[in-house]
Amino acid sequence: MGLEAHAPMIKYIGSKRALLPWILGTIEKIHAITPLRRAVDLFSGSARVGHALKARGFYVIANDHATYAYVLAQALIEADARAYPPQALAPILARLMALKPQPGWFTQVYCHEARYFHPKNGARIEAIRTAIEAYEDPRLRAILLTSLLLAADRVDSTTGIQMAYLKRWAPRAHRDLCLAYPPLLPGAGEAHQADALALAEGLSADLFYLDPPYNQHAYLGNYHVWETLVRFDRPRTYGVARKRSDVQSRKSPFNSRKEARGALERLLASIKAPHLLLSFNDEGFFQAQEIEAMLADWGFVVRLSRPYRRYVGARIGIYNPRGEKVGRVSHTENHEFLFVATQHRRVYQALRACAG
């Protein structure tokens, strides 16, 4: 089982990049006691966890309601690298790279009205995205879009989220956009774009990994530019950040303090698997003890915890459009929790010993 934990992925506030060895190590402890074959990543986001599980030989089922996350999962989880090898994609990527820059709506909105990309790269992004539309194979399109997302992410001018952009161009924004073969893996997998509550009822697996939104900040609002780049639908936008207008209506119950508890309880009740891992942190709607109580009827429960640095934007602070710092940073570190619920006593005992 190879490890692709450090494969290039988009910058993502919910990414488990630094925590991945911890998460995978926990899963390996379970696997050593009771072998696992099928894993569900129900809120896949950047696909980092699902990709790492596929690299280790699991059959992964990935899901997310955001279109950009679905596209990433199509490429990084569902696509088989043996069907789309580097030598087959190299001439396609070269043709896309050779396209003449094509400034249009995307460049105007996200490079001039907002400043997420330098205009020279925005025009190239727009030309490449327009050309990708002509490819009919949905997995190939997803692979090409993933290559474009990764390339655009390497030349953006943000702190990692698209709630705002930097007052001055980030040094990387001046680099030239460059498409590369994305980190595809051999083997099969599944990608879904569905409501997690509805999908979970029809799935069965050896292990479910859950990383739901934990507070009021929606990932769609944090990564609206990726949603627009993938959909390429010229949406109505608003505010200095030029967010898609549907950010205001495409809401998840997990982003609502009023609805989150009921949504999580319904989800946990619908899951069919002997093992479940739930990621959360101390900035979420629930205290650790509340989550343990929700899991109590599901199986044996172990809580693992470790400190974690907050994303760079939170450490830098908040600035107004004039570049003036407003407010102050309250804290630069939080605690990440990994709750393991299992129906196997031996697994519980092994993890309990590790938790001290």
Image: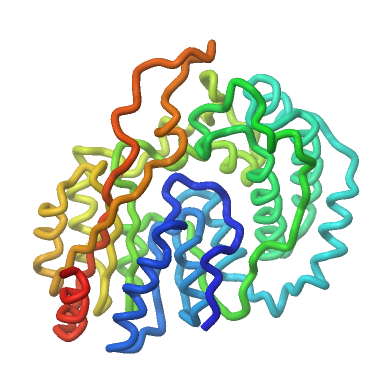
| Quarter-of-image position of residue 218 | top left
Q: Residue at x 70, y 48 (%)?
A: 151
* Above or below, comparing residue 330 to residue 341 in the picture: above
As displayed, is residue 153 above or below residue 113?
Answer: below
Quadrant in which the C terminus is drawn? bottom left
Left or right, 345 with reference to 28: left
* The one of 250 and 46 positioned closer to us in this rendering: 46
Q: Nearer the viewer, residue 327 or 288?
A: 327
- Residue drawn 13% across and 74% down? 300
Coloring scheme used:
rainbow
Q: How many numbered dots are placed on residues in this image?
A: 0
Residue 211 at x, y percent in the picture: 34, 56
Q: From the viewer's perspective, tell me whether residue 128 is left or right of residue 284.
A: right
**Residue 133: image x %, image y %?**
75, 50
- Residue 81, x across and y down, in percent: 67, 75
Q: Name which residue lies at 49% across and 30% down.
A: 163
Residue 235 occupies quadrant: top right
Residue 213's place in the image compared with 52, above or below, is above
Identify the residue at horizontal 43%, vertical 23% (top origin).
318
